[in-house]
Amino acid sequence: MLSSVQINIPHDLAARLEQSAFQIPQIIELGLRELNASAQVGYKGFADILEFLADLPEPEKIIELRPSEYLQSRISRLLEKNRSQGLTADEEQEWEQYQYLEHLVRMAKAKALLK
């Protein structure tokens, strides 16, 4: 089932969308997914890495993978806060999620090195 939606957007964005008109449903879906995910605790910064890995890049690209500036900055802030005053329960959960993400990236890099 299809629905129609009419929205008002800036002219420059409309011009960019015209070039990708056949992909508009996918663009909206990805944008909504990112918007919803970024509101979840601990998810901000994960999306780029997970989407990169989901694209099944060449092994060399996986080995070159580094955290975004945001992710590196957030990890540094959590480390510093943990050393100076300790983390809240939410921050502790966020830290554990970052550790798990790092584990996944290390596994991907190890497998990429084998290839």
Image (cartoon, rainbow, N blue to C red):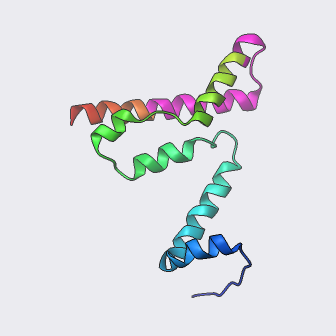
9, 103: nearer the viewer: 9
Q: What residue span does the magenta drawing correspond to?
A: 81-103
Residue depicted at x 50% and y 76%? 19
Residue 80 lies in quadrant: top right
| Left or right: where 49 falls relative to 109 | right
- Asked if 113 appears above or below 7 in the picture, the reply is above
- Residue 95 x %, y %: 63, 28
* Residue 39, horizontal then vertical, whole percent: 71, 50
Q: Which quarter shows the C terminus?
A: top left
Q: Count the marks: how many?
A: 0
The rendered magenta stretch, by its main secondary structure, is classed as helix
In the rendering, at what x and y percent does residue 97 appear? 59, 34
Q: Quadrant of residue 81?
A: top right
Residue at the image position 65 percent from the left and 39 percent from the top: 42
Would you place residue 82 above or below residue 30 in this image? above
Q: Which of the image's four quarters has the N terminus?
A: bottom right
Above or below: residue 13 compared with residue 73: below
Residue 10 left/right relative to 99: right
Residue 113 screen position, x and y as percent: 26, 31
Which residue is at the far left? 115
Q: What residue do we see at 29% from left, 34% from top?
A: 111
Q: Assess whether residue 100 is covered by the magenta stretch.
A: yes
Looking at the rendering, which quadrant does residue 3 occupy?
bottom right
16 or 94: nearer the viewer: 16
Which residue is outermost to the top? Answer: 84
Taking the magenta stretch, the answer to whether it contains residue 55 is no
Front residue of this view, candidates 17 and 84: 17
